[in-house]
Image: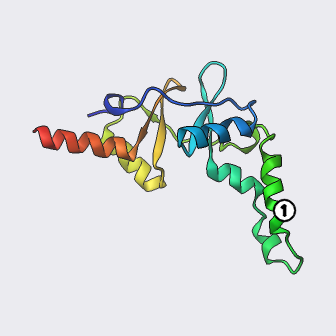
Amino acid sequence: MQVQDIMATSVKTVTPEQPVKDIAIMMVMDHISGAPVVDDDNNLVGIISEKDILQHMFPKLDEVMSDTHFDFENMEHNYKDTMNVKIGDLMTKEVASIELSMPCLKAASTMWLRKFRRIPVTHNGKLVGIVSIGDVHRAIFKSCMTS
């Protein structure tokens, strides 16, 4: 079984120029934790996650550990400011992806080793789908039950 047999092809995406508010709304309304970032030609250029957004508003470790007082109450205001930042400024640019023809269990192994729950699927650099650990599990389970 290959990735192309089990991947989801209806993928919510965003562009680097969009404000973070767009992906935050999508995350809340669609119950997702991130999305691939594509350019106008559907080339995968990054990925944005809740972690990327929250990391922008949280203090750095040295700020928390310093003797100076950090205003944690002001963090909510920082979140509001983050909503206007461009996705391209916060996204992870070094994106791991997998190819359509990759065996499902190799994809699952890749996700397991990198501690990913899902990974974009590309063909010639273009986003064509996404596959999750759950997709692989369901496919393997179904194949075992029908054999």
Task: Establish if 5 lies above or below 24.
Answer: above
Q: Position of residue 100 (x, y in %)?
A: 39, 29
* x, y percent for residue 50: 63, 49
Q: Residue at x 75, y 30 (%)?
A: 17
Which of the image's four quarters has the C terminus? top left
Q: Which residue is found at the position 38% from the left and 47% from the top?
A: 133
Mark 1 residue element: helix
The quadrant holding residue 5 is top left
Residue 68 vertical placement versus 3 (above, below): below
Q: Total marks drawn? A: 1
The amino acid type of the residue labelled 1 equals: Asn
Position of residue 27 in the picture relative to residue 77 (left or right): left
Dot 1, how many residues are within 10 Å of its Cα: few (below 14), some (14-19), or many (20+)? few
Q: Which of 139 and 72 lies nearest the eye of the viewer?
A: 72
**Quadrant of image for the N terminus:** top left
Name the foreground residue: 129 vs 107. Answer: 129
- With respect to residue 16, does 126 lie above or below? above
- Per the image, the residue denoted by label 1 is 74
In this view, the residue farthest toward the bottom is: 67
